[in-house]
Every structure is written in structure tokens, then in C-alpha cells.
Image (cartoon, grey):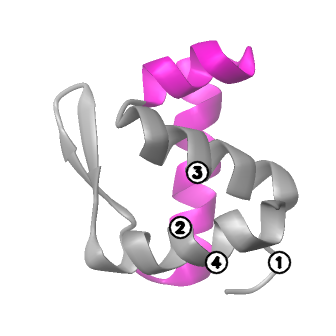
């Protein structure tokens, strides 16, 4: 994972917690497109999909679960 920002990790952590980009956007006072863009950039840097998208709901992939563990450690 190259050049992931703290902002991307914070957004990723919230999206994983809420299992929704829209809910993460509300919690972080962002727009849903901003959350989606941050997640696409993070997925591009990781090189793997971090979420399975099901309409408005998202679920972590196995890679996403691993990244979440490290993201939480970094943010703590």
C-alpha cells in the first residue's frame, strides 16, 4: 500500500463500521461521492477491492478486513 493518507484510512474505517458510504459520509461531514472517491483511490493503491458493493450497502472483502486491522492500529 503506497501513499495511503490518514484521511483515506479514517474514511475507510468509518465506511467499514457503518457498512455504508452514505452513513460514513454523514458521520465524517462529507458528501457520499467524496467517500466513494477516497475508497476508489485507496483500492487503487492497495491493488485489491476492499469492499463488495450491494446497492447502497457495502461489505468488506477479505483484503478489506486485513487492511481494516492495520488502519485501526495506525489511527489509534
Q: Kindly state the secondary structure of the residue where label 4 is placed.
A: helix
Identify the image quadrant of residue 35.
top right
Q: What stretch is highlighted in magenta?
A: 21-48
Dots 4, 2 in contact, CB < 8 A: yes
Task: Classify residue 24 as left or right of residue 10.
Answer: left
Identify the image quadrant of residue 37.
top right
Q: Is residue 70 magenta?
A: no
Q: Look at the picture and state if 35 lies above or below 13.
A: above
Give whichever of discs 3 and 2 has the lower sequence position.
Answer: 3
* Relative image position of residue 17 (x, y in whole percent): 46, 41
* Relative image position of residue 30 (x, y in whole percent): 71, 19
Identified at 71% across, 23% down, the residue is: 28
Q: How far apart are marks 1 and 2 (CA)?
A: 16 Å
Give whichever of discs 1 and 4 has the lower sequence position.
Answer: 1
Give whichever of discs 4 and 3 has the lower sequence position.
Answer: 3
Q: Residue 12 carries which label?
A: 3
Q: Kindly state the secondary structure of the residue where label 1 is placed.
A: loop
Identified at 67% across, 86% down, the residue is: 1
* Relative image position of residue 60 (x, y in whole percent): 31, 59
Q: Which of marks 1 and 4 is in front?
A: 4
Q: How far apart are marks 4 and 3 (CA)?
A: 11 Å
Q: Residue 68 carries which label?
A: 2
Dots 3, 2 in contact, CB < 8 A: yes
Q: Name the residue under label 1.
A: 3
Density class for disc 3 (Cα within 10 Å; few <14, some 14-19, many ≥20) is many
Q: Name the residue under label 4.
A: 70
Amino acid at each position: 500500500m503506497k501513499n495511503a493518507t490518514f484521511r483515506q484510512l479514517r474514511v475507510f474505517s468509518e465506511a467499514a463500521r457503518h457498512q455504508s458510504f452514505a452513513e460514513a459520509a454523514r458521520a465524517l461531514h462529507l458528501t457520499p461521492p467524496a467517500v466513494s472517491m477516497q475508497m476508489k483511490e485507496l483500492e487503487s493503491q492497495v491493488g485489491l477491492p476492499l469492499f463488495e458493493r450491494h446497492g447502497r450497502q457495502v461489505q468488506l472483502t477479505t483484503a478489506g478486513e486485513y487492511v481494516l486491522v492495520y488502519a485501526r492500529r495506525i489511527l489509534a
